[in-house]
Amino acid sequence: TDGKRQQHQLMSNNISELIANVGKCERILSTPMPATYTRLSTRFLLVWLGLLPMMFYLKIGSGAVFATFVVAFFLLGIEDLGVQIEEPFSVLPLTRITDKIAAEASVVLNLKQKS
């Protein structure tokens, strides 16, 4: 029947899209990020933040400690965000996503077995 053909075509398209997306995720996962890049940027940031109070002290005096803390908080937060972006699969809720896909696949399988 026409309705079953449309459902089959829709399911086939969804499976093809899922396979393509899994391939894209595998490429992202297997793309190496040089560890030296992360280490270099972190070391540079820490040295810069270590020298920052001296510059602030010349301009704002004893408020240099607070100003350095504020700047360090934001810059180290951005640096941590960059590290997380380099390894997206350690942050993403992949177990929950795969459990949902498995549940939906079992619903489809049960519907197919009933018909």
Image (spheres, rainbow, N blue to C red):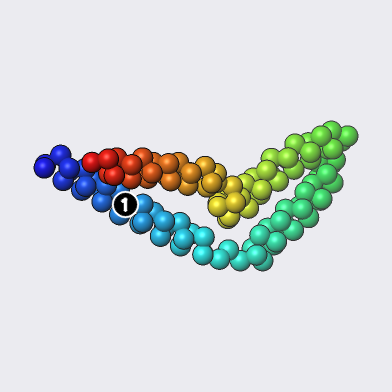
Tell me: 111 left or right of 77: left
Front residue of this view, candidates 33 and 105: 105
Name which residue lies at 15% across and 39% down. Answer: 3
**Relative to 74, is 29 above or below?**
below
Q: Position of residue 53 (x, y in %)?
A: 83, 44
Tell me: 53 left or right of 82: right
Residue 60 in sight here: no
Name which residue lies at 47% across and 47% down. Answer: 98
Please tell me in which quadrant of the rendered image residue 64 appears: top right
Residue 89 in sight here: yes
Tell me: 60 left or right of 21: right
Residue under numbered circle 1: 15
Outermost residue, front side = 114
Q: Residues within 10 Å of mark 1 (few under 14, many from 20)?
A: few
Query: In the picture, which quadrant includes the C terminus?
Result: top left
Name which residue lies at 11% across and 42% down. Answer: 1
Q: Position of residue 73 (x, y in %)?
A: 73, 40
Front residue of this view, candidates 11 and 86: 11
Front residue of this view, candidates 68 and 2: 2
Q: Position of residue 12 (x, y in %)?
A: 26, 51
**Amino acid of disc 1:** Ile
Q: Position of residue 106 (x, y in %)?
A: 38, 44
Determine whether the residue tagged by mark 1 lies in a helix, strand or loop: helix
Outermost residue, left side = 1
**Relative to 90, is 70 above or below?**
above
